[in-house]
Image (cartoon, rainbow, N blue to C red):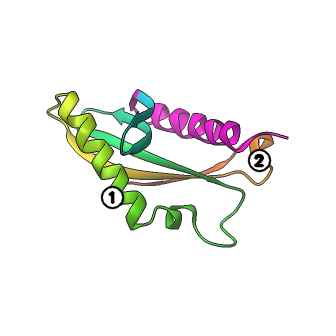
Amino acid sequence: MLRHRDAGAWGEDQAAKYLKKRGFRILERNASCRFGEIDLIARNRQYLVFVEVKLRKSDAFARAAEFVDARKQARLRAAAELWLAQHETELQPRFDVIEVYAPEGVETKKPTINHLEDAF
């Protein structure tokens, strides 16, 4: 049985592949600081995107993005502010949520990916 952390890494891999196909370059994965962790930091020509990845088997209970509550958003904002203080950029920062739905878990061949741009 796959551990939760391993499944999360698989979900982040799926999100990173999705972003790369859409012209983003992944700058960092699992950027950690005292405020928390940012799953992916990516950029394109216009935006520097801080991405929270949520992996679920389905949305039968609730959409994955609904688990990015106000408290989580505040931690992500604080972590992003610290990251920006240490990395100069002229790009517009943005917070996205990428939902990865994988009914068969990591064995899912084609997970469904929903990209919520400027999610909060």
Quarter in which the C terminus is drawn: bottom left
The tag on residue 44 is none
Q: Around disc 2, counting alpha carbons within 10 Å, would you say few (fewer than 14), some (14 to 19), or many (20 or more)?
A: some
Q: Which of 54 and 103 is in front in this view?
A: 54
Residue 51 lies left or right of residue 16; in this view the side is left
Q: What stretch is highlighted in magenta?
A: 1-27
Determine which residue is flagged by label 2: 105
Vertical comparison of 60 with 33: above or below: below
CB contact under 8 Å: marks 2 and 1: no
- Residue 80 % position (x, y): 29, 43
Dot 1 amino acid type: Ala
Q: Position of residue 65 (x, y in %)?
A: 50, 62
Predominant SS of the magenta segment: helix
At x 42% / y 58%, what residue is drawn?
72
Residue ranking furthest to the left: 90
Which residue in the structure is indicated by mark 1? 74
Q: Residue at left 27%, top 35%? A: 83
Q: Is residue 61 magenta?
A: no
Look at 46% across and 37% down and name the residue there: 19
Q: Earlier in the sequence, mark 2 or mark 1?
A: 1
Quarter holding residue 85: top left
Numbered disc 1: secondary structure: helix
Q: Nearer the viewer, mark 2 or mark 1?
A: 1
